Amino acid sequence: MIHRMALGDLPAKHHIQLRENGKLLMEQMVTREGFNGPYSILYYRRPPTDETRVEAFELPGFCPVELTADQLLERRHLRSAHVGRRGDWLSGRRTLLVSTDLRLGVCKPTAEGRRFFVNGDGDELLFVTQGGGRLESLYGVLPFQRHDYLLIPRSTPYRLVTEDDTTFLWMEGRPGMGVPGEWRNRSGQLTDFAPYSHRDFRVPERLLEFDDSEDARSVITKRGDRLTVHHHRHFPFDIAGWDGAVYPVAFNIHDYQPKTGLVHLPPTIHVTFAGPRFVVCSFVPRKVDYHPQAIPCPYAHANVDMDEILYYVEGNFTSRRGIEAESISLHPAGITHGPHPGAYEASIGSERTDELAVMIDCTPPFRLTTVAEEIEDRDYHLSWLEKE
């Protein structure tokens, strides 16, 4: 969804024969918005429909989730650094916050998982807090590293091969997400005033290798917030080639080009990805406001239409106290939030900020899960009170 690319063998036109050693390959289209949106066309050595059985499946804590019974309207702080390591890149996921349009959680895998996963509910965005590895998908192999975003289109079969210390924040955006329209020109190209360029996005490097192990023939699919396992007779992703504009990409947050103004600019100037009713922003080290009387620390803000989430990665979080790496704050609509006492005036004279964080604004309200409840800092809402 960044630009058109191609890997492997392709016929001269769409919907005509492609043969390999005399065998006719099966063409498949992956389309968005019916047939009106971006699409890719793939060529299979074996038809992708040779399933032998389908079974119900659950990964409690990821899918299904249990929401808190009673959620007062409060500012909230989740210490996700306290979520323990467990499972693989999929079974180790823990859902923390849920809205109708966006779900998010964390994952700290300890085991290798070779099964493929398909999210049929929305596009996925992973932020790699630490570690690295490679994303193996229907579209090929995409290496990733620390502080990368991985944008994975809806219904893409994929799996992760991760390093031992990998930690990531994951998001599921419905019905999808991508580069916001304000950063594109009429031809779809990223504009020269966008905070990134086409060169910053990395794409699959090579086709996926054949893997006929039993795990690789079992595909876990999420749709309607339920999981099923689809068992195939053969490796279902034996691709000879593909082209199109639907495929996973990687983007490193340090390649984001932040904007600074004479006075403080609102956080939406840092939008990186967006869905219909939510945005994902990147806060990276940058120069701050340069008016001689500027106050670099963010002003108090009344959330009228959106819940605001911040995932703190590293650096000096000048507006907040009691925050640590991997902290997640939730400031819901209906409550004013702002800098902690003393931070506002203390920021005067600052020339740079070294914070690294991911911000999510979403119109539908978020609910906490019982997993989130276990790691919540219950003193956070009243932490703005001046100590006497």
Image (cartoon, helix red, strand yellow):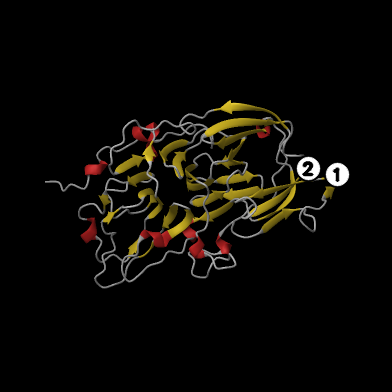
Callout 1: SS: strand
Question: Which of 39/387 is in front?
Answer: 39
Coordinates of residue 349 in the picture (x, y in percent): 25, 66
Quadrant of image for the N terminus: bottom right
Marks 2 and 1, Cα distance to the nearest angstrom? 8 Å
The amino acid type, in three-letter code, at marker 2 is Arg
Vertical side of 46 occupied by 355: above or below = below
Coordinates of residue 177 in the picture (x, y in percent): 51, 52
At a point 21% along the width and 43% down the height, the residue shown is: 382
Q: Which residue is mark 2?
A: 45
Question: Which of 259/14 is in front?
Answer: 14
Callout 2: SS: loop
At a point 26% along the width and 68% down the height, the residue shown is: 294
Q: Is residue 263 left or right of residue 255?
A: left
Check the image and name the residue furthest to the right. Answer: 22
Name the N-terminal-most of marks 2 and 1. 1
The amino acid type, in three-letter code, at marker 1 is Lys
Q: Which residue is mark 1?
A: 23
Coordinates of residue 11 in the picture (x, y in percent): 80, 55
At a point 32% along the width and 42% down the height, the residue shown is: 77
Image marks 2 and 1: residues in contact by CB distance under 8 Å: yes
